[in-house]
Image: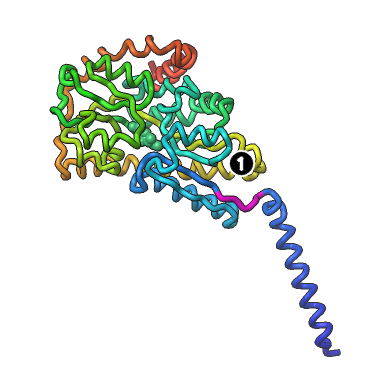
């Protein structure tokens, strides 16, 4: 007997109903655990910096894992405040995320100062091993007590000096230079020990201070020097590699607590996806950035090993002077982890 249109209709509805139930049923755990969300993330560098590559990879990951339920809104060049201000907004639960250097946050978590110790890491491989290993996790655990969740360490990078006075080819060449440093007593002490007139300042104020001549110098990775266009207001760049600064992808502790476990895992997973893209881009662009700032008029120099050793020796006492503030066990911990890495 040929089925009536009514029967066909019922079969279709049933099939449709079963399909829908299956679809909702299959999706239900995910939909139940994933809410529609808008996440604000801010940073102090410009959108041309490799941080943007990491953010785009993180955004794509979030979109895929939440089936488009999450929106990531980005704010660049300190437009939502400097690193410390944005981090305080996270602690208050009025902003979700910031990608920040560790250095400006030592007032919140003194142990972060360990990463400001001069010449701590010899290369990026060491930095990755420490940051992505037990030591980095220990620091992240301490940050959780301060009301922020560190989702991953990204790369700011090895820092080099720029200035508008003279090429810095020896320890003596630092003498009297008005150098902007991050708002951090370890950087302040390091550059005072080198003989400079070190001046703490938020990153967003540096370009204008260089442009007006209020300061002579600043120090940042080549990629930041290029993307912040410091070559417009600086004449010399010297390969001092005097410190390696990590970025952290921080999330608001109060807001994190309102996310389901599945959502929290997505945050961690996508920040790590972003980390690998951001680090790779930062390292791939470093040499190109150095070439570009030279093409834009900066005079580049490296220092001979004897002078570099004089500089390293001059700032070595900074470690002992700040161990108590950072935490003796923290300084000993990273020294031990590095010794193990180096097979010492
Ligand atoms: O938000 C990131 C910036 O603040 C970063 O570039 C920090 O390296 C930094 C500096 O010199 O302040």
Return the residue nearer the eye: 27 or 49: 49
Residue 39: % across, % down: 54, 47
Dominant secondary structure, magenta: loop
Residue drawn 57% across the image and 34% down it: 92
Q: Is 35 in the magenta?
A: yes
The image quadrant of residue 169 is top left
Number of residues whose C-alpha sits closer than 10 Å to that of mark 1, classed few (under 14), some (14–19) or many (20 or more): some
Q: Residue at x 58, y 37 (%)?
A: 93
Among the 4 quarters of the image, the one containing residue 220: top left
> Mark 1 sits on what residue?
264
Residue range of the region highlighted in magenta in the rendering? 34-38
Q: Is residue 64 left or right of residue 210?
A: right
Residue 279 lies left or right of residue 2; in this view the side is left
The quarter of the picture showing ligand 1:
top left
- 37 relative position to 13: left or right: left
**Residue 146 picture location, percent across and down:** 56, 26
**Residue 114 in view in this figure:** yes
Secondary structure of residue under mark 1: helix
Q: Is mark 1 within 8 Å of ligand 1?
A: no
In-front residue for pair 45/300: 45
Quadrant into which the C terminus falls: top left
Q: Please give the name of the residue rendered at 33% of the width and 25% of the height, measured from the top-left corner.
A: 200
């Amino acid at each position: 007997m040929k089925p009536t249109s009514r029967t066909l209709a019922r079969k279709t509805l049933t099939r449709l109903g079963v399909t829908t139930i299956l679809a909702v049923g299959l999706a239900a755990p995910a939909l139940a655990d994933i809410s529609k969300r808008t996440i604000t993330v801010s940073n102090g560098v410009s959108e041309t910096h490799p941080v943007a590559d990491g953010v785009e990879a993180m955004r794509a990951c979030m979109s895929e894992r939440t089936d488009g339920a999450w929106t990531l809104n980005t704010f660049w060049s300190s437009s939502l405040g400097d690193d410390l201000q944005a981090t305080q907004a996270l602690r208050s639960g009025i902003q979700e995320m910031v990608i920040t250097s560790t250095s400006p946050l030592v007032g919140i978590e003194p142990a972060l100062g360990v990463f400001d110790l001069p010449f701590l890491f010899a290369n990026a491989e060491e930095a990755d091993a420490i940051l992505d290993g037990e030591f980095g996790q220990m620091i992240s655990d301490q940050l959780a007590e301060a009301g922020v969740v560190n989702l991953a360490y990204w790369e700011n990078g090895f820092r080099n000096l720029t200035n508008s006075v003279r090429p810095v080819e020896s320890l003596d060449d630092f003498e009297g230079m008005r150098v902007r440093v991050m708002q951090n007593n370890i950087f302040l002490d390091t550059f005072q020990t080198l003989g400079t007139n070190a001046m703490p300042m938020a990153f967003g104020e540096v370009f204008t201070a260089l442009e007006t001549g209020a300061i002579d110098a600043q120090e940042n990775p080549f990629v930041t020097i290029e993307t912040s266009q410091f070559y417009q207001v600086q004449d010399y760049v010297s390969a001092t590699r005097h410190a390696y600064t990590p970025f952290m992808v921080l999330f608001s502790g109060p807001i994190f607590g309102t996310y389901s476990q599945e959502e929290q895992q997505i945050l961690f997973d996508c920040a790590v996806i972003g980390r690998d893209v951001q680090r790779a881009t930062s390292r791939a662009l470093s040499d190109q950035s150095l070439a570009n700032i030279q093409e834009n008029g900066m005079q580049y120099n490296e220092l001979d090993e004897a002078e570099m050793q004089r500089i390293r020796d001059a700032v070595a006492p900074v470690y002992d002077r700040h161990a108590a503030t950072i935490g003796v066990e923290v300084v000993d911990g990273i020294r031990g982890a590095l010794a193990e890495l180096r097979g010492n």
